Structure formats: structure tokens, C-alpha cells
Amino acid sequence: MKVLSVNVGVPRSKPTKKRGMTGIDKRPVDHPVLVRAPGPKTTGLHSGLVGDPIGNIRHHGGDDQAIYAYAREDYDWWEKELGRNLAGGAFGENLTTLGVDVTGAMIGEVWRIGDVLELQPTFGRVPCATFQARMAEPQWSKRFTRANRTGAYLRVVTPGPVRADDSIEVVHRPVKSVSIAEAFHIYMLDKSRLARLLDAEGLPADLRAEVEKKIS
């Protein structure tokens, strides 16, 4: 299991609005990049990857979405579905992985990447209008949701550098949790089971509060 590429965003104008910037256009880099906890979503450093821009700080970035990872194996599946090539970074992820079941990861488990960096999966990626526009595929958001190959957002447990070819090892699994795939399916498509998400000890606090409010 390893990092296939580290992808840093290039600021672009938002395709869905006349004004505003998006960092969804991620490009692989050939040097180590520091990863650190960015702090609160709207007032912190935004991305966990130093030098990586985030345009919509209301819905992206912050400690619980510090890094976004996507598996090369899921890209291979999408290439067959879409009939087109998809390079690492095409979905706007910071880390393209190889040999890691990213969407099957348990919320709250800990990945050690390289010698120092430790990251923790928190939730799947909910598709937005910018992602829809970037892909230019009919009904992309709905298709991405139904496929449930979401990749995973990660929080930073221990900061450190990351580079292509760094090894990835799962060094901790929580006693109680829910997989990224199951949690995403429930949240997006099966809200009658929302209470199940509360079994994930590492669920982001704002999402836990949202679920508790809905089921109360």
C-alpha cells in the first residue's frame, strides 16, 4: 500500500460562477509536501497540504477534511464506466493511493504514511456543483453517489511530510466504527439508518451533531 502521487491544486476560476476560485484542479508534484492540521474550516489554514488552495472554505477544508484521498483502483473502475482516461488528481484529491481500500476504510482508523505522518479517515466525499462541472458528465453527482466510490477525507493525527511512493500502513482500528462506504450510503441514500453513524467514534463533531438533531 502506498501513495501513488501527491497532488497540489492550481487556482482556477469557478466554472459554475462568474466570480470565485476553486482548487479542484490538482496536479502531481515531485517533491515532499508538508501536511499539518489546518484548524477550523472557515478561519484556519483551510487545506492540510501546504500550498494547496481551497476556494469554498465553507464546505471544504478544515481539520476534518484536511486531506482528500482517492484510490487508483477506483479510477480504473471509472475509466471503464466512462470510457476515458483519468489521471491522478482528476477528482481533486490530494493523495492518489495504490493498494488501499480507501472507501472501505473505517472511520477513525489511523494510517501511517512514510515515517511520521498519520492520517485518519473521517467521511466520504459528497459531490458538489464544481465537481459536476469539472467532470462534464450527465448526472455526474447522482452517478458518483450511487456508485459509492467516494474516496475519503482525512484528518491529521500527526503532522509530517508526504511524497509519492511513501508507504501506507493501517496502525490503528477503532473498537466501534462504520466504514466510509456504509456511512456515505446511509447519509446520502438511506436516512432511516442515520443512527448507525453514531457508532463511529471518529465521526466529525459537526456531522455527529447533525445526525443527533435529525434522529431526536
Image (cartoon, rainbow, N blue to C red):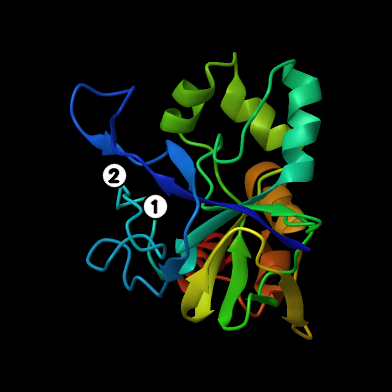
Badge 2 amino acid? Gly
Whether residue 21 sits left or right of residue 91 in the image: it is left
Q: Is residue 208 visible?
A: no
Q: Nearer the viewer, residue 159 or 198?
A: 159
* Quarter of the figure that contains the N terminus: bottom right
Task: Identify the residue under disc 2.
Answer: 55
Q: Nearer the viewer, residue 163 or 139?
A: 163
Q: Residue at x 68, y 66 (%)?
A: 197
> Image quarter for residue 111?
bottom right
Percent across and percent down for residue 152 are 62, 56
Disc marking residue 60: 1
Percent across and percent down for residue 71 are 71, 48
The number of callouts visible is 2
Would you call the spot at circle 1 few (<14 residues within 10 Å), some (14-19), or many (20 or more)? some
Do the residues bearing badges 2 and 1 touch, measured as CB atoms within 8 Å?
A: yes
Q: Residue at x 53, y 67 (%)?
A: 162
Percent across and percent down for residue 174 are 74, 83
- N-terminal of the pair, mark 2 or mark 1, is 2
Would you call the spot at circle 2 few (<14 residues within 10 Å), some (14-19), or many (20 or more)? some
Whether residue 37 sits left or right of residue 170 in the image: it is left
